[in-house]
Amino acid sequence: MLHKLSRFAVRRPVSVLALWVAVTIAGFGFGLGVFDRLVGDTETVPGSESYRAAQLVDAAGGQPESIAAVITGRPADDPALRGQVDQAVAELRSMPGVTAVAGPEPATATGQALLVRIAIAPDGGTPATDASEVAEAAATRLHRIPAGLPGVRVAVGGGPLQGHETTAQAQRDVIKAELLTTPLVLILLLLVFGGIVAAGLPLVVAAAGVGATFGVLYLCSAVTDVSLYAIQTTTTLAVGLAVDYALLMVGRFREERRTAPDVASAVVATVATAGRTVVCSGLTVAVALAGLVVFPNPFLRSMGLAGATVVAIDALAAVTLLPALLTLAGRRIAAARPRPDRGVFAAIARFVQRRPAVVLIATTGLLVLLAAPALGMTISQGDPRMMPSGSQTRQLWEQLETHFPDHARTGGAEIVASAAADDPQLLRLRDTVTALPGVVAVDVRPVSPVVTVLDVDGTGEDLVPALRAVDAPFEFAVGGGPAQLSDYRTMIADRLPWAVAFVVAATLLLLFAFTGSVLLPIKAVLTNALSLGAALGVVVWVFQDGHLAGLLRDQGLGYVHLTVPVLAGAIAFGLAMDYEVFLLGRIREHWLAGAGPHESVAQGLQRTGGVVTAAALVLGVVFAGFLVGGFTPIKAVGVGLLAAVALDATLVRMLLVPATMTLLGRRNWWLPRPLQRLHLHVPITETPRIAPER
């Protein structure tokens, strides 16, 4: 198939280019509409009890949306301030869609703030408006309070306002990251290739990948929720892998140009060798992301589907669009200069080969040490501290913490009962719940004549199980933030083994097909698991424990957001396999060409050293774009991926892989006879073709 694709791209490069231009334009054209469909919900678990509780409330008409405002800058009893606030409250109470306004409530602890809370009808109150529009109108009125009152500040947030703010932040973060990283990537590519044409080709492939990514996300949003965290993660992944694959392909093309009679022959040879590596790499990364589909959580599932599709698109672009571009512009790309057999990377490999056991023990020990903090990981749904310090959501939370600490606590447990608010049996349930350990208070809140919510103010790890163990003669479900977190943890515990089994089994099969070995795939999974653990350990050390978090304009939160471990783990494992495939492809090529077990490793490391190092630098720059954003979970994913790339490109590739392959020797390529026959039918390995130096 690759041979046919390369031949078609060589014969009809303009047609292939036109097709990809159309795909890219279409992707950007309608795909940018995905920003209007983003959701901030990441912890929902369909089929869980907390999900059923939410459905019961929605079926009964839904809960009112609520926003809050804290007014500071003058004493709470300041007559001028009080007059402005009272006037605003009076106008809000008459605003269509506003069902209730509580306050202004003075801060009894400090006396320096007023609190106003506003309830909004779930449907906005009128057919022409929705809750979001009412919330925006209310916020606009509240922000007019400081007019004529120097020093007065108003922080408004919550409900639909928080959703709008996070979506807008996601858009700004994507733009900021692309503006920062694209010039740096171009500079790196110019340094690697030394020419504008060769350096520009990876960016063209990356642009096609990003355009297609927006299209994929838009299509996903039509059938499932797409999280606001998905935008920067998938687009960055699209850019990083597109440049990775293009680097490998263009580097191999320059090697083939030394011996190929013409550009077309060099392109075909490039696809037959590096193209097969790209296909295998793309499949391994896609498999790692596809493992997220095992989880019923819409966020993880949509990330798995979108991420795997994006990787497949990048790989397809590398073996179709890039050969077409090389056919059209290949004459302007200089052939690579001959590389010495005893360069820096070969010297590193030979150093490791002289004392492989020592290097293996030392490297493994260091990775285990880095992974140690991950053992103390605590996951949470998070709080407004994850937002940028200048955001209204963060400012409101900080003001509530300072002046109204009782109102700063959010996300309590809820018991949604199919009973009327005045049902004696419901009141007995309330009394029973009130007597449970850790419960401070229980409030009765009617939703409809036949559905009532008991708002439970309580703490403790055993609160949710205790609430669910209570008996009642009517249907009820325990929901709210603590219950959602409990159900999410249960989902991870139940489904993670299946996801890991799927990813490991598929990866072993792919690497078996690529290498024709039994031991190398097992070795690859084990070494990459070590680097994955180390990357997650770094994330916990920084964002949970707070070490060096200040350098990222962040702080230790005491937890890691629940989206980070699984998402960062899946991407990091896939990227680790990306470099593993790059290296093993060249090592096997030299092995099949007759090199010994030690020499093939040294030459494989030497031949891939420049490309993999350049790819790691580019990916590092791209993932650094995560760190300029405002969301702490996105920063945490970025730090995890930066750590994974750095560890894979240095400790794993330069030390751990040569050490293990040296100890295994010829056993690296051991293959039982029955599996030899099987491998003949499923090979996706590179052609054993060494471009001679001259």
Image (cartoon, rainbow, N blue to C red):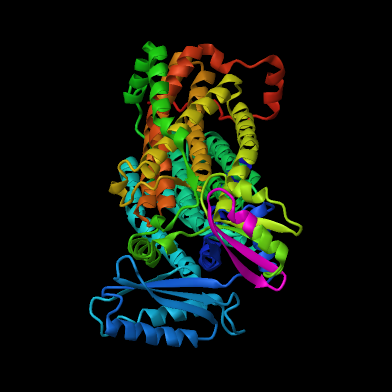
In the visual, does 252 lie left or right of 218?
Answer: left
Q: Can residue 290 be seen here? A: no
Q: Nearer the viewer, residue 630 or 212?
A: 630
At a point 32% along the width and 23% down the height, the residue shown is 343
- State the image coordinates of residue 621 (x, y, percent, origin top left): 35, 46
Of the 4 image quadrants, the one containing the C terminus is top left
Quarter holding the N terminus is top right
Residue in the foreground of this view, choosing between 144 and 673: 144
Residue 439 as seen in the image, left or right of residue 192: right
Name above or below for residue 314 compared with residue 431. above
Report the residue at 30% width, 42% height from top. Answer: 548
Q: Is residue 451 magenta?
A: yes
Residue 145 magenta-drawn? no
Q: Which residues are magenta?
A: 431-457
The one nearer the camera, 3 or 447, is: 447
Q: Quadrant of residue 376?
A: top left
Q: Is residue 111 above or below residue 291?
A: below
Q: How many marks?
A: 0
| Residue projecting furthest to the left | 150
Toward the viewer: 325 or 502?
502
The chief SS type of the magenta part is strand
Q: Is residue 578 above or below residue 439?
A: above
Asked if residue 39 lies left or right of residue 152, the reply is right
- Residue at 47% of width from left, 42% of height from top? 378
The x, y position of residue 523, in whole percent, is 53, 23
Can you see residue 633?
yes
> Measured from the top left, where is residue 689 in percent x and y?
52, 27
Q: Which residue is outermost to the right?
A: 473
Instruction: Report x, y in % for residue 149.
Output: 25, 82
